[in-house]
Amino acid sequence: MDFLTEAATGKSIKDCIVSELVAMFSKSITILLISFSFVAHSQQPQWRLAKGSEGVAIYDIDFYRPNPDTMYAKGSKWLMSTDKGETWIERYSWSAYGSLKVHPTNSKIIYENEQSSGTSSNDFYITHLDTGATKIFSGRGIPSFALAVDYMDKQTVYVGVADFLLKTKEGYPDKNVTPPGGRVLNIAIAPSNDSILVAVCEGDVYKSTDKGMSWSSIRFGGVPLYAAIHPTNPNIIAVSYKSYSAEPRGIQLTTDGGITWQSRYNGIDTTTPNNDTPFYVDQVLFNEKQPSEIYTIVSGKGVYHSSDTGLTWVEFNIGLPNMTNNFVRAFVIDTLNDRLYAGITASKINQFGIYIYDFKPTSVENEPNLKPSQFYLSQNYPNPFNPTTTITYMLPARAFVVLTVYDILGRKITTLVESVQDPGEHHINFNASALSSGVYLYRLQAGKHLSVKKMILQK
């Protein structure tokens, strides 16, 4: 019986929704627990700890761009994976604290920038899996872990060594391209134009349009930590900050190449225990597949996601250890396999390691407890969302499908689907940009099958 038929018997749509929800939640507690466990584990993506990385403090992660099966990580151990990060083995016994990048065309060559153990020197190595590590540069002073590979010309590497930024060819000496601000904390190359660089120095952000031959200051003040450049528009630059109570705070973003800046941290928890405790946003990543999507890590808070170029943010830490006293040191996105990787340094050693986040829910075909012939309405993802989310459902047979969204009072907002559909898995995008924050219901009817779930819009 659908809503129109029930309404004809005297029931309001609100009463129909309430009665359906009551019926759903009146099932036995055992069935509810099994269903919740299944949805949370199989359908709703969450972070999971990779095998072999347990107990390892991770400082950086990178993968071989042509084939992301090959990955490397460094920290309290030097790790390697050949199955997209699912399992890791110890490749070298030494501790390696610093940055790591894989060569663009040779998966056996890794560029490394690190602080030498027990000294104040900052060294740059080229490590070859077959022959080991070769020291290329060494500098005295406070370490600089800036390291970036130009994936367009596939030869140039920018590396920070103590107070200098050096441009190299295949990792070997070429030019000194140090900005006027001195020691470089982070260097970013524009993905769409490798002549454009952004260097984060102590208290200043510099931009170059000629591969580091000349620089201009585009953001002065505060304590900038990390810069990211939009995948297709080099005028859009995001910079993260360490800050106390004053601006610049959180994330600053420019859309005009650095002429003007806006604060972009709405939705990020910026509270600290007291005014003497700084608030850190450590890293920012643009999604090359969906450039409006940005990911960031906040010390002591965890991972945040924005789907509107930083205007609003939503935390997603399910599966990670409690982030109050834990930190994400490494953060990388694999757009070929739709995955995020986070390296965790935690308060408990058994929570150290590499955590994986799959953007898409686990495939129904890969779940042995759910037969492909069953009807199933998945929890929308992401949830909470802003302003778009995806609703996934499985049809056991060809059927007339009606997918409708209601507010919590039972008033119809919109009909997303009203047509005959073939059996199989279906994905529907819902854009709630015109709606206000709150709880909404989505109702799927396919033939004799009926299901209702709630979703949360958080602006």
Image (cartoon, helix red, strand yellow):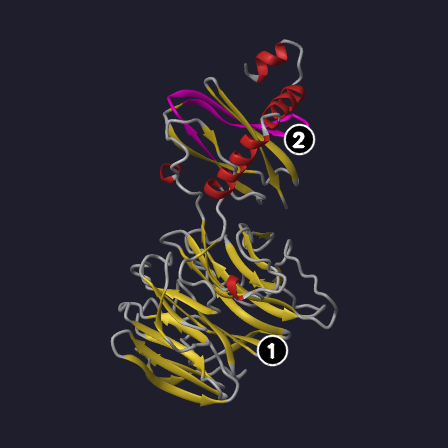
Q: Residue furthest right?
A: 275
Name which residue lies at 60% across and 58% down.
322
Magenta extent:
392-420
Q: What residue does disc 2 label?
A: 408
Name which residue lies at 61% across and 59% down.
264
Is residue 320 shown above or below 273? above
> Do we see residue 453 in this rendering?
yes
Is residue 101 shown above or below 32? below
Q: What residue does disc 1 label?
A: 203
Report x, y in % for residue 273: 72, 65
Q: Which of 241 and 214 is in front in this view?
A: 241
Magenta: main secondary structure equals strand
- Left/right placement of residue 420 relative to residue 30 reads left
Label 2: few (<14), some (14–19) or many (≥20) C-alpha neighbours in 10 Å:
some
**Secondary element at image label 2:** loop
**Secondary element at image label 1:** loop
Mark 1 and mark 2: Cα distance apart in space: 48 Å
Report x, y in % for residue 197: 45, 72
Which one is in front in this view, the residue at disc 1 or the one at disc 2? 2
Q: Which residue lies furthest to the front in this view?
A: 30
Q: Which of 285 and 273 is in front in this view?
A: 273
Is residue 23 shown above or below 146? above
Amino acid on which the number 1 mark rests in the picture? Gly
Report x, y in % for residue 160: 45, 80
In which quadrant of the rendered image does the N terminus lie?
A: top right
Is residue 51 shown above or below 127? above
